[in-house]
Image: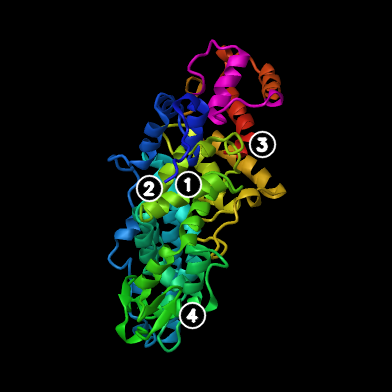
């Protein structure tokens, strides 16, 4: 097996350490960056891949533990019982149920954003965000908060494990079963929606399967449904198509698990997954060598996602100058990164963060389509850029505990030194001459750092987060 080119200790620096922290998480605090800089690249990557035993301080939302949270209908009533009610009573009950679900989902958005800010295991949450866009499902169709949160937890549990197992779990996932209509798939009339998206968007990519493959995969997944009144997987044996099927290189009375196994046997499966990982964590510009190394590792480890991620985060091409600070932050990344950068202790209100992300185009649990969010340059338009600046300023102004000493522990620094401290904290790298000159000109209009008051700090912070370079990661 060819040796993967990894980043050497000689090339490890404060900038590469920050790059890892931003891409494998949501950005380091100054203290975390100091610690990462002292490690070897492999040791630093291990910190992200090996989750700490410490648990996040954000517990699951209270509503999740309610008795009827997992029921599919208002107050846990079966659908056939609802039909017996008078129309007016039924409509009133359903309206109350919808309102409750919307409230629960909003609390779940707030919970997740706060978890991203507080988590001691940032890669866990970054991966959860990645899989949320990869296996995109929406509350708009599912209409219940419980399965959306359950799916979010599945992303967390399976996101670093075995790809084959993960695909089976997602094929049985209640939110996915409803979103892509497989819950209603029957042997006499198999629904092809899930089979098509499984092959095109989730595992192989367009052009690597036939229409017959879709039809036979749909047959194999018939009968994969839900319990009548609970958000729990159930295989309905009477609706299973147990007839002979041919899917790619396999033939026989194939079931859903057989389809997944055959998918992961295809050479394109590891290539497709490697490209998706590279695009999200590294660059939208493909890198054939790096993606081939990730793909080869996935195949050689029976699709151990953790090993694929290790190759990605230690690969020398991951730290190429064209990759570092080469991505536009998604609204969630912008919000969480800024919250972590401004203060290591307090967390902005979840409601404020959720509203800001929605205004900027990323409404968690409601991606625009089964393809997820387009990302990249699509995040920035004339209107969203001004909204980004405004939202960033709001986060700065509400940080009551952020003072001069937090921003500048050493108040004796001259303007050039102040500029470098600020660039290190907010941009994690030295910037171009033009950008340094512009910052020097701005600082020259302020008193020396030794005379700064809180309003000076707010002015400086707002200036920093409203610069185009803060939109990059």
Answer yes or no: is residue 25 visible.
Answer: no
Tell whether 448 sits left or right of 89: right
Residue 215: mark: 4
**In the foreground, 441 or 434:** 434
Q: Which residue is mark 1?
A: 293
Q: CA distance from mark 4 to mark 3?
A: 48 Å
Q: Secondary structure at mark 3?
A: helix
Q: Which numbered dot is residue 253?
A: none
| Residue 438 in the image: above or below residue 203 | above
Q: CA distance from mark 1 to mark 4?
A: 33 Å
- Label 1: element kind: helix
Closer to viewer: mark 1 or mark 4: 1
Upstream in sequence: badge 4 or badge 2: 4
The spot of residue 11 in percent (x, y) is 50, 26
User: Which residue is the site of mark 2?
Assistant: 306
Q: Earlier in the sequence, mark 1 or mark 4?
A: 4
Work out whether 150 lies above or below 118. Answer: below
Q: Earlier in the sequence, mark 2 or mark 1?
A: 1
Span shown in magenta: 407-435
Q: Is residue 278 magenta?
A: no
Residue tagged by mark 3? 468
On the rendered image, what quadrant is the C terminus found in? top right
């Amino acid at each position: 097996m060819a040796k993967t080119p990894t980043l050497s200790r000689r090339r490890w620096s404060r900038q590469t350490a920050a790059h890892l922290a931003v891409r494998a998480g949501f950005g380091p605090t100054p203290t975390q960056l100091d610690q990462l800089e002292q490690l070897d690249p492999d040791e630093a990557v291990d910190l992200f891949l090996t989750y700490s035993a410490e648990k996040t301080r954000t517990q699951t939302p209270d509503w999740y533990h309610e008795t009827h949270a997992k029921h599919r209908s208002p107050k846990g009533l079966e659908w056939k019982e609802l039909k017996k009610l008078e129309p007016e009573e039924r409509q009133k009950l359903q309206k109350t149920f919808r309102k409750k679900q919307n409230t629960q989902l909003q609390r779940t958005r707030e919970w997740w954003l706060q978890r991203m800010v507080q988590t001691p295991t940032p890669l866990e949450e970054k991966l959860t965000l990645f899989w949320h866009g990869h296996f995109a499902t929406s509350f708009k169709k599912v209409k219940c908060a419980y399965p959306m949160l359950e799916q979010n937890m599945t992303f967390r549990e399976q996101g670093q494990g075995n790809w084959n197992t993960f695909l089976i779990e997602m094929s049985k996932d209640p939110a996915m079963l409803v979103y892509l209509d497989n819950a209603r798939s029957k042997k006499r009339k198999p629904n092809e929606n899930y089979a098509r998206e499984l092959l095109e968007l989730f595992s192989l990519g367009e052009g690597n399967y036939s229409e017959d493959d879709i039809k036979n995969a749909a047959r194999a997944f018939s009968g994969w449904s839900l319990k009548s009144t609970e958000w729990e997987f159930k295989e309905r044996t009477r609706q299973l198509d147990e007839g002979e099927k041919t899917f790619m290189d396999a033939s026989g009375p194939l079931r859903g698990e057989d389809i997944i196994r055959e998918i992961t046997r295809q050479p394109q499966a590891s290539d497709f997954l490697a490209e998706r990982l590279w695009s999200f964590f590294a660059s939208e510009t493909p890198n054939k060598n790096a993606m081939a190394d990730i793909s080869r590792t996935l195949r050689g480890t029976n699709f151990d996602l953790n090993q694929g991620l290790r190759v990605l985060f230690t690969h020398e091409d991951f730290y190429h100058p064209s990759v570092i600070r080469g991505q536009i932050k998604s609204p969630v990344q912008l919000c969480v990164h800024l919250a972590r950068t401004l203060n290591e202790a307090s967390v902005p209100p979840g409601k404020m963060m959720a509203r800001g992300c929605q205004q900027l185009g990323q409404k968690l649990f409601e991606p625009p389509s089964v393809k997820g969010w387009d990302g990249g340059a699509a995040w920035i338009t004339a209107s969203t850029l001004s909204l980004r600046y405004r939202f960033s300023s709001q986060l700065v102004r509400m940080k009551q505990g952020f003072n001069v000493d937090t921003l500048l522990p050493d108040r004796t620094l001259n303007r050039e030194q102040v500029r470098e401290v600020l660039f290190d904290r907010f941009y994690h790298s030295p910037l171009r001459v033009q950008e340094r000159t512009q910052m020097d000109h701005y600082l020259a209009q302020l008193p020396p750092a030794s005379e700064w008051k809180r309003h000076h700090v707010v002015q400086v912070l707002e200036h920093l987060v409203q610069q185009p370079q803060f939109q990059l990661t």
